[in-house]
Image (tube, helix red, strand yellow):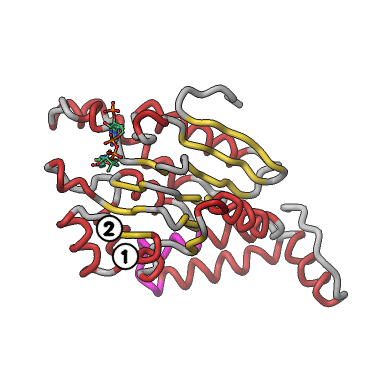
């Protein structure tokens, strides 16, 4: 596993992996190199048996202020298509373990889209969340028009994407875009606490639950329900299901092996 990166920091705290975006001079602008490193680290942690949940964070000032505008500014349609460097983004959704975003400060453009790719979002009161691409003559390109609209509804998504104005953490909570808003000093700790809670569960059940929830975005409900049912049935061949139910009946805490 690669441990030295130029644009991110990685760490482990028991069963929790922590990935920190680290380009402080440019508010964690998401360059292609940063995205490559991020996806590599997420993939490595996804395969690391000790890790049960991943926390993704930035700095207090910025989760990420978007894709790197400097890098994009000279692109042409054909150039950007042939290089296909943005394809890295598609690999984030392949990560099977739960990713909890701990968001403080700016989460703009690609930063907001990266945040929405996470499974749970804990926001500091300082967070400013938005899709300001319209201000630089483009539109969201990493799923913002789709994921934001599903999260906050058509009207709010139109307002955010067409005006480019960010919303506060509290407003984001009101619209269901983030799970929790907490004082600035504890946003990372809160995300870690959430990750620790998830890490106590059966990793097999966690994985199949995440997979089934995400299915909702690309299937009609009838297919999604069938998919959920199959995942539910599948868990009955795991040791964790036997242990979880036995522990309940014996009035004790379960010990999950992940098998
Ligand atoms: N890219 C590059 N540099 C950035 C940046 C960015 N997105 N955001 C900030 N910086 C740099 C600034 O240029 C400045 O650098 P120096 O001048 O010091 O060298 C430094 O960070 C500090 O920024 P400011 O001086 O501007 O700081 P302020 O506090 O005054 O303002 C701000 C903070 C966040 C409001 C402001 O920096 C800002 O408006 N930033 C740009 C936000 C933005 O427009 N974001 C959207 C970018 S477009 C795709 C995947 C992703 C995307 C598209 C397609 N595919 C998969 C196809 C994503 C696109 C985008 O995100």
Residue 204 is covered by the magenta coloring: no
Horizontally, residue 149 falls left or right of residue 222, namely: left
Residue 221 occupies quadrant? bottom left
Query: Whereabouts is ligand 1, in terms of quadrant?
Result: top left
Horizontally, residue 91 falls left or right of residue 245, namely: left
Nearer to the camera, 257 or 116:
116
Horizontally, residue 72 falls left or right of residue 45, namely: left
Nearer to the camera, 130 or 210:
130
- Residue 170 at what x, y percent from top left? 39, 65
**Is 120 placed above or below 94 here?**
below
Q: Find numbered disc 2 in the image and state the secondary structure of the residue it sits on.
A: helix
Q: Residue at x 34, y 31 (%)?
A: 26
Q: Which residues are magenta?
A: 211-222
Q: Quadrant of the N terminus?
A: top right
Q: Residue at x 46, y 36 (%)?
A: 21
Q: Residue at x 66, y 44 (%)?
A: 51
- Residue 7 at what x, y percent from top left? 45, 27
Question: Which residue lies under the disc numbered 1?
Answer: 150
Residue 216 is covered by the magenta coloring: yes
Question: Which residue lies under the disc numbered 2?
Answer: 146
Disc 2 from disc 1: Cα separation: 6 Å
Nearer to the camera, 125 or 232:
125
The reply to whether callout 2 and callout 1 are in contact (CB within 8 Å) is yes
Residue 9 badge:
none
- Residue 250 at what x, y percent from top left? 87, 75
Nearer to the camera, 82 or 116:
116
Residue 68 occupies quadrant? top left
Horizontally, residue 37 falls left or right of residue 86, namely: right
Name the main secondary structure of what is drawn in magenta. helix
Q: Find numbered disc 1 in the image and state the secondary structure of the residue it sits on.
A: helix
């Amino acid at each position: 596993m690669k441990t030295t990166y130029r644009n991110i920091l990685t760490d482990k705290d028991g069963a929790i992996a922590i990935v920190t975006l680290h380009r402080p001079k440019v508010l964690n602008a998401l360059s292609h190199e940063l995205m490559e490193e991020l996806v590599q680290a997420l993939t490595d942690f996804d395969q690391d048996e000790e890790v049960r949940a991943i926390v993704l964070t930035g700095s207090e000032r910025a989760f990420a202020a978007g894709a790197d505008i400097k890098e994009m500014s000279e692109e042409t349609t054909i150039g950007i298509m042939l290089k296909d460097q943005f394809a890295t983004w598609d690999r984030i959704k392949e990560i099977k373990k739960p990713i909890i975003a701990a968001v403080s400060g700016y989460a703009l453009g690609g930063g907001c889209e990266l945040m929405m790719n996470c499974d749970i979002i804990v926001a500091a009161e300082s967070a400013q969340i938005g899709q300001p691409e319209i201000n630089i003559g483009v539109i969201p390109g990493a799923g913002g028009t789709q994921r934001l609209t599903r999260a906050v509804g058509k009207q709010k998504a139109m307002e955010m994407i067409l005006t480019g104005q960010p919303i506060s953490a509290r407003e984001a909570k009101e619209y269901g875009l983030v799970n929790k808003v907490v004082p600035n000093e504890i946003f990372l700790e809160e995300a870690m606490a959430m990750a620790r809670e998830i890490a106590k569960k059966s990793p097999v059940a966690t994985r199949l639950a995440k997979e089934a929830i995400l299915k909702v975005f690309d299937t009609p409900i009838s297919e999604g329900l069938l998919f959920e049912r199959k995942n539910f049935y599948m868990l009955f061949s795991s040791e964790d299901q036997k242990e979880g139910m036995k522990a309940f009946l014996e009035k004790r805490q379960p010990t999950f092996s992940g098998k």
